[in-house]
Image (cartoon, rainbow, N blue to C red):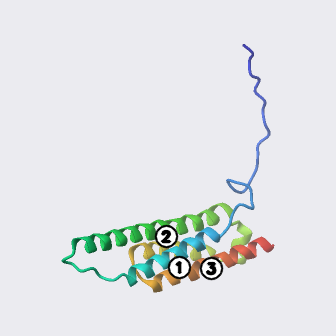
Amino acid sequence: MSQVTRHTLPPAHAHCDVPCGVYETDSMKWAATTCTKLTEKLNNLELPNWSDKKSVLEYQNTTARAISTKEEYAGICKREVLIVWTDYIKPEHLEKWPDLHEKVWKIAKQCSVVKRSVSIDECKKLEEMVHDFAHIFAETKKA
């Protein structure tokens, strides 16, 4: 048997976990929009005939699935925003946008509001906040 020789590699230096260029805001925008669409669906559901078991079960099934998916996508939105914030945003971005930490914190909190509510207004607020963050992200790419 031959012995494997270990080579010492020089240390790698990077500001993030993965190479730049893979960060994007489409996923967070898509997730926020999905929350809005599901909330619209929930708000537009017709109440079932409560004496018809099949209608009640269909209604409960639809609401349970829509709520579960809405919560999932609010979580995706939060995760995607936090990834860009923690892995991509650099000190020079904070110098240019000193309120960026607060913006991200508020987006994360708004994702939680969307999870626990069925409010179109709250979903639209999240979409606007994410749009604003995406605009800032795009501006960082121009520099």
Residue 2 occupies quadrant:
top right
Give the labeled residue for mark 3. Answer: 131
User: Can you see residue 99?
Assistant: no
Kindly identify the amino acid type of the residue bearing the numbered disc 1.
Answer: Leu
Kindly identify the amino acid type of the residue bearing the numbered disc 2.
Answer: Ala
Residue 57 occupies quadrant:
bottom left
Give the labeled residue for mark 1. Answer: 126
- The reply to whether callout 1 and callout 2 are in contact (CB within 8 Å) is yes
Q: Is residue 23 left or right of residue 143?
A: left
- Residue at horizontal 42 percent and vertical 72 percent from the top: 115
**Mark 3 residue element:** helix
Q: Position of residue 125 (x, y in %)?
A: 52, 83
Q: Position of residue 11 (x, y in %)?
A: 76, 42
**Mark 2 residue element:** helix
In this rendered view, identify the residue nearer to me: 13 or 43: 43
Give the labeled residue for mark 2. Answer: 74
- Residue at horizontal 74 percent and vertical 18 percent from the top: 3
In this rendered view, identify the residue nearer to me: 46 or 92: 46
